[in-house]
Image (tube, rainbow, N blue to C red):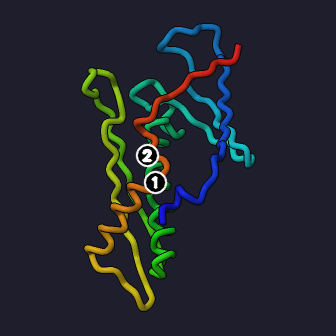
């Protein structure tokens, strides 16, 4: 059974807050630091990637996309393992997002590489083929992976 068949439409809201701090709004001068405020109360400092004049100590959108894809894949994998009664003790990933020019010559995250390391325990330890099948299913069921080529609707507030 697909996970998506049993889930109703949901909304997930994030507020983005940025404010100019300097009089000079030249491209090389303005601060790219901003906040992501989530409904549950979590606020995360974000910025552009360092190459695009952002602050490297804060998360950037490219990293956030890699984290979202990795997190969704992991959560889907854990759900699949649980439903198969396969016990997962730990799951680690070192996701890499590759920013490059796409086929239209536009900068784009053209590839995300997931490198999950999973530790299992219990009576049912999957073999490599079973683990690969679970990853394949996770990829096809992951909400975020299914969204990255989606039409984006822009609805400005004036």
Q: Nearer the viewer, residue 123 or 67?
A: 123
Quarter-of-image position of residue 44: top right
Image position of 44 with respect to 91: above or below: above
Quadrant assignment for the C terminus: top right
Quarter-of-image position of residue 31: top right
Q: Nearer the viewer, residue 71 or 23?
A: 71
Label disc, if present, on residue 106 of the rendered structure:
none
Q: Is residue 105 left or right of residue 81?
A: left
Going 61% across and 38% down the picture, which residue do you hit? 45
Q: Position of residue 67 (x, y in %)?
A: 47, 49
- Secondary structure beneath disc 1? loop
Going 31% across and 36% down the picture, which residue do you hit? 110
* Crowd rating for badge 1 (residues with CA inside 10 Å; few <14, some 14–19, many 20+): many
Going 46% across and 54% down the picture, which residue do you hit? 142
Q: Position of residue 134 (x, y in %)?
A: 36, 68
Residue labelled with disc 2: 146
Image position of 117 with respect to 22: above or below: below
- Count how many numbered circles sit on residues in the image: 2
* Crowd rating for badge 2 (residues with CA inside 10 Å; few <14, some 14–19, many 20+): few
Q: Farthest residue in the bottom direction?
A: 123
Q: Is residue 75 left or right of residue 120?
A: right
- Badges 1 and 2: C-beta atoms under 8 Å apart? yes
Q: Position of residue 84 (x, y in %)?
A: 45, 78
Residue labelled with disc 1: 142
- Secondary structure beneath disc 2? loop
Quarter-of-image position of residue 103: top left
Going 57% across and 9% down the picture, which residue do you hit? 25
Q: Is residue 147 left or right of residue 107?
A: right
Give how far apart the Cα atoms at labels 1 and 2 are: 6 Å
Q: Position of residue 68 (x, y in %)?
A: 49, 48
């Amino acid at each position: 059974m697909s996970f998506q068949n049993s889930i109703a439409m949901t909304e997930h809201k994030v507020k983005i807050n940025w404010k100019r701090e300097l009089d000079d709004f030249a491209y090389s001068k303005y601060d790219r630091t901003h906040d992501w405020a989530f409904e549950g109360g979590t606020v995360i400092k974000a910025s552009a990637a360092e190459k695009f004049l952002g602050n490297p100590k804060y998360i950037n959108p490219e990293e956030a996309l890699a984290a979202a894809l990795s997190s969704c894949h992991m959560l889907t994998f854990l759900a699949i393992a649980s439903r198969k009664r396969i016990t997962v003790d730990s799951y680690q990933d070192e996701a890499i997002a590759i920013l490059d020019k796409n086929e239209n010559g536009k900068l784009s995250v053209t590839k995300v590489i997931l490198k999950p390391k999973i530790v299992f325990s219990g009576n049912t330890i999957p073999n490599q083929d079973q683990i690969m099948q679970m990853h394949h299913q996770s990829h096809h069921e992951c909400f975020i992976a299914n969204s990255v080529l989606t039409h984006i609707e822009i609805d400005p507030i004036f």
